[in-house]
Image (cartoon, coloured by chain):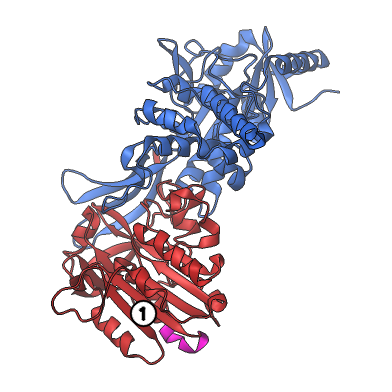
Chain colours: A blue, B red
Amino acid sequence: MEDTQYVVLKKDRFEEFIAALSSMQKLVAPVAKGFGAYAFEEVTSADPIALNYIPTILPLKKYFMPQRETLLEFTLDRRSHAEAVVEYEPLTIFGAHTCDLAGIQCLNMVFSERPKDYNYLLRKGTITLIGLECNDYCDEYASCHLVHASFPSGGYDLLFTDLGDYFMVHINTVSGDRIVRTAGLCEGAGSAHMNELRSLRDRKRTVFRNEVPIKTKLIPELFDAVFGARVWDNLNERCLACGNCTNVCPTCYCFNIKDELDLTLARGIRYRVWDSCQLEPFARVAGGINFRKERSARQRHRYYRKFRYPVDRFARFFCTGCGRCTRACMADISLKETLSELIKESEERVWKKWL
Amino acid sequence: MEKVVIKDSGYRLKKATILRTKNLTRNEKFFEIALKDGSSLDHEPGQFIMVSLLGIGESPISVCSSPSRRDSFDLCIRAVGKVTRRLHTLKKGDEIGIRGPYGRGFPVNIITGNDLLIIAGGLGIAPLRSLITYVLDNRRDFGKVHILFGCKEPKEMLFSDELEQWSQRTDLHYACTVDRADPEWAGNVGVITTLIPGVDIEPLRTFAAVVGPPVMYTFVIKELLKKGIPKRQILLSFERNMACGNGKCGHCQIQNLYVCQDGPVFNYEQIKNLSEAF
């Protein structure tokens, strides 16, 4: 029986498919930027698209909650007036890895929680997401299996899986189906194709293993035990408090709100801009008291916001295992290493209890 | 780039007019404010609002009047940041923007029927004034009401005429202290914790409401626990940096809690194990 959720796109038709996609609306995809780095940017042909890439410098959140976005527009004349606005640009994203799809699923939960954030939700509705499955690890920094992000689990309109001379395309939504129909370049998937997909997934199960020696379901327990660990003191000495790790994190969404007047001083905007809990003034109140003054407390806060707090609030981890924080850290603080150290220290504690 | 106006935005402002101002001390100013569309703020005692000055920014401020007065509300603002300093230059008739009210205030419906021990340190009297005036408006619903007030020096005393009135009332037990006296001061001298042992309460049916500077909490909680007040009945309001008020921007987080949505009022049981709270 043919599964209508799956179609096949031969690789010699990929170029045509991308051209069709970009003719529908603005299309962005991973592009090589040199120095082994990649970035999502606009493409109009298949040529610049990097199909084999390590996670891009910035994750997809840059499209869902832009680094800087206008919340209010106002005038300051006699009868001052302010209006809440959202700016958006309909967009198709091609080539999102499963870690980045997981990142968007996390943001979706945060911004749909009441009170809802309509700036995010409105923009999200205008973005089409086409995923690209990872057949193997991108590099040694990834820890996607640990957080259940190495295999696709929704969050996309279409998902591409590279199976040699063709892509298997999973149609997950009606708008994904519309794209496939409009492009008209795909053909039905037969049982031979389905078998090839199945054997790829079987092979993946032998390649992808928990990257840190702990069972995933025990992570919350681990974090319950290590709030006072020495590991945080070690990070205190190494962290430069630059905020790179949070800027590149697909699930870090903290922001600040600021006002800006134009040169006439009669009009202005209130905008939000990415902020980072790693920066010194983040938790400081007027009057000067800082509730997370030490870098150890700020780093610990970051880890708990990935592995502990969201488990209670959203029943999932907010780490997608993409490895960006490790790649971007100037002080070589590694997520995998930190987790391993925490595991080691917690085991020490358990032993001490018994001795 | 396309742009649409959104009516549901959490950042939309309500226009409000300043009806009256009064300098309380050198740093604190009192504002009575009404919403321009004539509607009521409809807040709970202990909730806060975001006060907005277009082109300058927003600042989270506790409402310091009782919700039983519906046509206007009060704010007591200390000039410490760029928004609050600018607010101090405003006068009667000026317009501001507000969002909110936000957060969880004092659970007055749960406190009803119990005794109440209110402990205010310095500017902490502002959010507590909303509770105190609410209790006075509904005095019959509550048991014994104690108010303890402390501040650094007599000249920093906020709402001194109201404090004076409260001290005269027969339906309130009132005591106050200052850390450092001046020549005219005839009352207690010492930190606020010195007033707690002398308060005559029935701990199991007493709720304590505590607001003050961060250093105050640890010591006051210790005294209250010594008195035998259950942890769940010790209510604390926290001040944190807040930018959005919607539980998103992350600035106000105490571990897994967002002060702007889960607080600012917490009971001690909720937060006793959170080291970032104290």
Q: Residue A137: give x, y in percent of width and height.
A: 60, 15
Three-letter code for the amino acid on which mark 1 is drawn? Asp
Q: Is residue B139 magenta?
A: yes
> Foreground residue, A226 or A153?
A226
Residue drawn 35% across the image and 71% down it = B194
Tally of numbered discs: 1
Q: Is residue A158 visible?
A: yes
Q: Is residue B136 above or below residue B277?
A: below
Q: Is residue B243 magenta?
A: no
Say left or right for B57 vs A235. left
Q: Is residue B22 above or below residue A162?
A: below
Residue drawn 45% across the image and 53% down it = B246
> Foreground residue, A205 or A27?
A205
Q: Residue B230: give x, y in percent of width and height.
A: 56, 68
Say left or right for A291 vs A348. left
Q: Is residue B64 above or below residue B244?
A: below
Look at mark 1 in the image and give the residue it sits on: B71
Q: Give the chain letter at badge 1.
A: B
Q: Is residue A322 visible?
A: no
* Quadrant (top left, top right, bottom left, bottom right) of the C terminus of chain A: top right
Residue drawn 42% across the image and 55% down it = B245
Q: Which residues are magenta?
A: B135-142
Q: Secondary structure at mark 1?
A: loop
Q: Residue A264: give x, y in percent of width and height.
A: 15, 46
> Foreground residue, A324 or A72?
A324
Overall secondary structure of the magenta section: helix
Q: Is residue B71 above or below residue B272?
A: below
Quarter of image, res B75: bottom left
